[in-house]
Image (cartoon, rainbow, N blue to C red):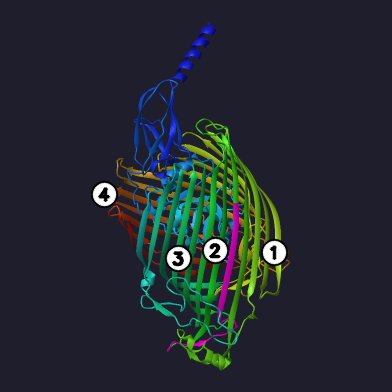
């Protein structure tokens, strides 16, 4: 009886198992010479049974026997319906090629036949399927939110904020030194001698396919990682051909209010390409190219750009994709407000009303060629050239305790900075066998940052009734002209050999082993020279017009002996140079234990050598400093799929943070209100990182996620004020440890999505980050480690991390609608907010400097009037909030800096041929 019962159960179970059939196949992109189409939707019509194609375009679906209709679709592509009949235990193979159609909104920005990773839905699907903990923003989302540069794009993602007035970003409360930047997986050097990372505002979104923000470390990334790595994937056009011209205009309300009196420096031109040299015999003659008298400008900016792409087929499998873009953008800004420092009791030390006129340009050119030799081998070349410039004319009027007791000091500073970035990359992908593949990349980058002929003059207003000014002089550096140049070259090499484990007939594997090498070789040369003008006592009583100082500083007055010229060491500039070499080997094991549980276990070894040499006014004889380190960096990433729409993830890792060249060079840099000095005794900090994340993908283009994270940092590096009469700033390992912990929430939802051939959709997105940071402050540790050379008298024993806000919020609401004949509109309202954040630590019982919380609101409207013509309209910083930095003294808060940026209106037209 028992045998009969068991036989019945076995027969019944076998019958149930035999009832299923299988539909499998490969989806390709017809417009891309039948390249695999990943992340496409495969579904039985009228049912919830479905799946998506993998990275190779393969899919497999278990279905009940019978007659079905298989729907094959992808955003921006025509949907294909295939009738199919399935019998028990039968496998039916269906291979199809999809073609672009139906339409993606705003083809001027999102071309229908571009690679799928530009699309929000594809990036979300990739995030869902990947074992790594990923976060990306693609060209489609950048267009919808009206983002113009990479810095603004990154600040739209969870846990990331942008520093006011710069292109620096903070990831989970950690600033420049804790983050890294790469392009197509290869490192990018900095354009600023004070910064580790390149200014992300230099990269316009025209060159971007998508941007990845890795906040969880994996061993393919260099170990100099604390907050995150920003990787820019350059645009890779694929299609039949496109050519587009864009032209636009913009105006800042602050700037246009100064129309007719918007004054900038003489010399720098409209284009941002300027070459100003140190004059011949500068210590004995006054032969400067640029005058001190300002020039008036009309403060209306704009942009013009062109981009083109074309694909060519070679044989049955070969294909060459070409893309090029060139653009020019400029803009005018004006701000005014308080800029001051005060004592712990609130007494003024330096107190000015500042007016700042600014003109910025950005010229970008990019070319890339992607040649697919066949289905197994491809190579890619990327070239990027960026020239950016910023000229500013600052006027500080007020009080300086080192001069006179009255509020009558005028400081004029004219500055011009030109940055040139040139990036060359060659990358390759090779499928050697069904299981073995090789990825490689190499790059050579060069950056030059030039500050030619910065001017500074100080004057006293002696005759208020007639606005009469005389030249001021307390030190020989009060009136000067300054030249600075930085050149950095960097070569890099990436190699990765991948071996698939347990590959089945559909090309699916249980995982893969990756072994690789990274090399990074950087050299920097920096030099600066300042020519100081010592004025005779007799000439310090003469009245001069601040806008016509050429009446005094000229060759005739130099010959008459009214002033003399000197520098630090004759015509020998102050210099420092840096060399950094990193050799790294890494290994990863990615393994899928089951359909639900996957992991990546990795180990990375890095050998780091850094040498800095200098000869400066602080060390005229010159010196050098070298450190060598070996770092072992483990990482573990775990993923558990709760169901088809939900994942749990965890990441654990150890990383480090390197000091930068200028931070370790004994070099002094003087600004109007601060002086910075390097610290040769600075050394790397160690970071321990933990992330836990839950995510759900309710529908295509929708996401809900919750993350908690923590970081423990040993020997954190900080920028601090020293206990000195001039409040010098230096860089120190501030204490034994610090930590960061917090939570992140993100949601994207289609509120209204009317199904049909044309888009009619209202969508919303929000991400919120809440975090806490803390670090020990130990002045004795700093004194001991610098042999008493640096002295701190810190107000507090603990503090948060500089640049960290407790709360970050980004929200947007978008409406998109298409009509016939490719007409359509898209409107987006985007809001961003950061809470109070620490700018600098307090010393000598003075309170910390804190930037008060601030929110910004933008409106973006894009329209397609026809298949070829589009018009865009933007309003940025609608609320125009006041930026306020306060010094939080125990006796009360005192404003240290205040200003408003103004509202920016923009109008653009684009035309596709």
| Precedes in sequence: disc 3 or disc 1 | 3
Tell me the mark number nearer the camera, choosing from 1 and 4: 4
Q: Is residue 473 magenta?
A: yes
- Give how far apart the Cα atoms at labels 2 and 3 are: 28 Å
- The mark found on residue 774 in the picture is none
Q: Secondary structure at mark 4?
A: loop
278 vs 462, nearest the viewer: 278
Residue extent of the magenta highlight: 465-493
Q: Secondary structure at mark 2?
A: strand
* Spot occupied by residue 76 in the image (x, y as percentages of width and height): 36, 44
Q: Residue at x 36, y 70 (%)?
A: 300
Q: CA distance from mark 3 to mark 1?
A: 37 Å
Question: In 3D space, how far apart are the residues under numbered discs 1 and 4 (Cα atoms)?
Answer: 67 Å
Which residue, given by chain and number where applicable, does mark 3 sit on?
A: 362
Marks 2 and 3 in Cβ contact (< 8 Å): no
Q: Which callout, 2 or 1, points to the residue nearer the camera?
A: 1
Residue linked to disc 4: 821
At 56% from the left and 34% from the top, the residue drawn is 510
Instruction: Confirm whether the magenta stretch covers residue 619.
Output: no
Q: Residue furthest front?
A: 315
Compared to 79, does 785 lie above or below?
below
């Amino acid at each position: 009886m028992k045998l009969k019962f068991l036989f019945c159960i076995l027969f019944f179970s076998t019958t149930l198992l035999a009832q299923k059939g299988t539909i499998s196949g490969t989806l390709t992109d017809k417009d891309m010479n039948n390249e695999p189409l990943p992340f496409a939707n495969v579904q039985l019509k009228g049912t919830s049974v479905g799946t998506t194609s993998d990275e190779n375009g393969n899919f497999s679906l278990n279905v009940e026997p019978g007659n079905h209709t298989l729907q094959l679709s992808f955003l921006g592509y025509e949907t294909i319906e295939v009738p199919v009949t399935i019998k028990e235990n039968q496998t039916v193979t269906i291979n199809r090629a999809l073609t672009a159609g139906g339409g993606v909104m705003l083809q001027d920005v999102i071309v229908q036949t571009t690679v799928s990773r530009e699309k929000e839905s594809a990036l979300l699907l990739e995030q869902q399927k990947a074992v790594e903990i990923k976060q990306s923003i693609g060209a489609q989302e950048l267009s919808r939110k009206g983002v113009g540069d990479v810095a603004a794009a990154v600040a739209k993602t969870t846990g990331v904020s942008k520093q006011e007035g710069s292109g620096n970003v903070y990831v989970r409360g950690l600033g420049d030194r804790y983050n890294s930047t790469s392009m197509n997986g290869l490192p990018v050097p900095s354009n600023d001698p004070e910064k580790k990372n390149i200014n992300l505002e230099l990269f316009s979104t025209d060159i971007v396919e998508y941007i990845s923000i890795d906040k969880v470390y994996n061993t393919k990334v260099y170990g100099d990682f604390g907050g995150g790595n920003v990787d820019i994937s350059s645009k890779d056009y694929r299609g039949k051909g496109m050519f587009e011209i864009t032209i636009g205009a913009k105006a800042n309300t602050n700037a246009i209010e100064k129309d007719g009196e918007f004054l900038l420096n003489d010399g720098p031109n409209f284009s941002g390409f300027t070459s100003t040299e140190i004059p011949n015999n500068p210590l004995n003659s006054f032969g400067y190219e640029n005058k001190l008298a300002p020039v008036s400008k009309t403060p209306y900016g704009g942009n013009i750009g062109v981009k083109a792409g074309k694909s060519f087929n070679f044989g049955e499998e070969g294909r060459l994709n070409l893309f090029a873009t060139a653009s020019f953008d400029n803009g005018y800004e004006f701000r005014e407000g308080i800029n001051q420092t005060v004592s712990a009791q609130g007494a003024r030390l330096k107190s000015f009303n500042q007016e700042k006129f600014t003109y910025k340009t950005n010229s970008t050119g990019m070319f890339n060629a992607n040649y697919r030799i066949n289905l197994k081998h491809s190579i890619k070349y990327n070239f990027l050239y960026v020239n950016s410039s910023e000229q500013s004319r600052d006027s500080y009027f007020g009080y300086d305790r080192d001069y006179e007791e009255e509020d009558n000091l005028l400081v004029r500073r004219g500055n011009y900075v030109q940055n040139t970035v040139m990036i060359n990359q060659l990358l390759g992908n090779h499928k050697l066998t069904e299981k073995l593949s090789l990825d490689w990349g190499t790059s050579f980058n060069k950056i030059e940052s030039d500050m030619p002929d910065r001017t500074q003059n100080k004057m006293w207003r002696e005759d208020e009734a007639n606005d009469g000014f005389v030249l001021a002089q307390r030190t020989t550096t009060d009136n000067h002209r300054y030249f600075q140049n930085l050149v950095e070259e960097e070569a890099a090499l990436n190699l990765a050999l991948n071996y698939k484990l347990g590959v089945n007939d559909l090309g699916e594997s249980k995982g893969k082993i990756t072994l690789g090498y990274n090399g990074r070789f950087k050299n920097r040369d920096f030099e600066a020279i300042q020519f100081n003008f010592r004025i005779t006592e007799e000439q310090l009583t003469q009245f001069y017009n601040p806008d016509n100082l050429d009446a005094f500083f000229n060759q005739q007055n130099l010959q008459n002996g009214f002033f003399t010229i000197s520098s630090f060491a004759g015509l020998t500039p102050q210099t420092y140079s840096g060399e950094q070499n990193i050799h790294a080997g890494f290994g990863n094991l990615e393994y899928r234990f089951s359909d639900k549980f996957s992991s990546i276990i990795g180990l990375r070894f890095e050998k780091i050598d850094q040498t800095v040499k200098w000869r400066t006014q602080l060390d005229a004889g010159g010196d050098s400093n070298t450190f060598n380190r070996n770092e072992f960096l483990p990482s573990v990433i775990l993923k558990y799929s709760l169901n088809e729409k939900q994942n749990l993830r965890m990441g654990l890792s150890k990383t480090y943070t390197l000091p930068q060249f200028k931070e370790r060079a004994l070099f002094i840099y003087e600004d109007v209100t601060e002086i910075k000095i390097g610290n040769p005794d600075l050394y790397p900090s160690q970071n321990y990182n933990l992330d836990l994340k839950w995510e759900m993908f309710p529908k295509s283009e929708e996401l809900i996620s919750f993350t908690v994270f923590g970081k423990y940092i040993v020997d954190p590096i900080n920028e601090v004020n020293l206990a000195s009469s001039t409040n010098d700033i230096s860089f120190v390992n501030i204490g034994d440890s610090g930590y960061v912990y917090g939570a992140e929430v993100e949601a994207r939802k289609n509120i209204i999505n009317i199904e049909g051939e044309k888009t009619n959709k209202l969508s919303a997105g929000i991400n919120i980050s809440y975090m806490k940071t803390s670090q020990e402050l130990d002045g004795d540790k700093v004194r001991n480690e610098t042999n008493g050379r640096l002295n701190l008298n810190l107000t507090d024993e603990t503090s948060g991390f500089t640049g960290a806000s407790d709360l970050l919020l980004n929200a947007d609401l978008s409406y998109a609608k298409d009509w016939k004949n490719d007409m359509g509109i898209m409107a987006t309202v985007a809001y961003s907010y950061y809470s109070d954040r620490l700018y600098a630590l307090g010393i000598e019982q003075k309170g910390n400097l804190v930037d008060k919380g601030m929110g910004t609101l933008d409106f973006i409207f894009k329209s397609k009037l026809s298949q070829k013509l589009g018009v865009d309209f933007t309003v940025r910083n609608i609320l125009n909030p006041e930026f306020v930095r306060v010094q939080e003294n125990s006796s009360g808060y005192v404003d240290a800096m205040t200003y408003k940026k103004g509202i920016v209106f923009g109008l653009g037209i684009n035309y596709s041929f």
